[in-house]
Image: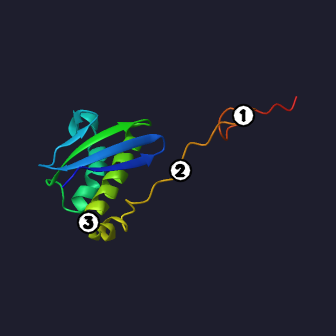
């Protein structure tokens, strides 16, 4: 098996995932998963496609991720891993699709408008 390369995005985070056969090591930006994502929720999000397809100890995963915050990065990695699982086996699509793991979340930060404080917030109105 060759290396499988997939890309996942969320907000402004971009994750490149490289899958090779191995023992289940997950390395993110040259750091182990536990050191990169300190909360258990984020670690669960990253491992979710592997747990659902029962491939937790089958592949070594190397990830390069940049941009956004830690939650956006974790969800970008999750999308890339889900896409990689579908490339490996078409049956995985039926497992991951109902969980919503193959859908790219389109929500982005709304831009700030001129003459306003933020995207929606206005400056205080003064009648006089």
Viewer-side label of 2, 1:
2
Question: With respect to residue 36, does 78 lie above or below?
Answer: below
* Residue drawn at 16 percent across, 44 percent down: 25
In terms of secondary structure, where does tag 2 sit? loop
Viewer-side label of 3, 2:
3
**Residue 70, image x, y percentages:** 37, 38
* Residue drawn at 65 percent across, 39 percent down: 119
Q: Are marks 3 and 1 in contact (CB under 8 Å)?
A: no
The residue tagged 1 is 116
Give the left or right position of residue 123, taking residue 101 as reference: right
Q: Report crowding for label 2: few under 14, some 14 to 19, many 20 or more residues within 10 A (C-alpha).
A: few
Which of the 4 image quadrants contains residue 125? top right
Q: Report crowding for label 3: few under 14, some 14 to 19, many 20 or more residues within 10 A (C-alpha).
A: few
Residue at the limit of the structure toward the top, as seen here: 128
- Give me the disc on residue 107: 2
**As rendered, which of 50 and 123 lies closer to the eye?**
50
Quarter of the N terminus within the rendering: bottom left
In terms of secondary structure, where does tag 3 sit? loop
Mark 3 vs mark 1, CA separation in Å: 50 Å
Give the mark nearer the N terminus: 3 vs 2.
3
* Residue drawn at 21 percent across, 38 percent down: 34
């Amino acid at each position: 098996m060759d290396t499988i390369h997939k890309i996942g995005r969320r907000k402004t985070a971009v994750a490149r995932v490289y899958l090779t056969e191995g023992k289940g090591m997950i390395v993110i930006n040259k750091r182990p998963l536990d050191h990169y994502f300190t909360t258990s929720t984020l670690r669960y999000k990253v491992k979710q496609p592997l747990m659902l397809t029962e491939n937790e100890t089958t592949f070594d995963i190397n990830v390069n991720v940049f941009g956004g915050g830690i939650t956006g990065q974790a969800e970008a990695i999750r999308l890339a891993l889900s896409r990689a699982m579908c490339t490996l086996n078409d049956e995985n699509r039926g497992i991951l699709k109902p969980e919503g793991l193959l859908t790219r979340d389109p929500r982005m930060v709304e831009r700030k408008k001129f003459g306003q404080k933020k995207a929606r917030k206005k400056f205080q109105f003064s009648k006089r």
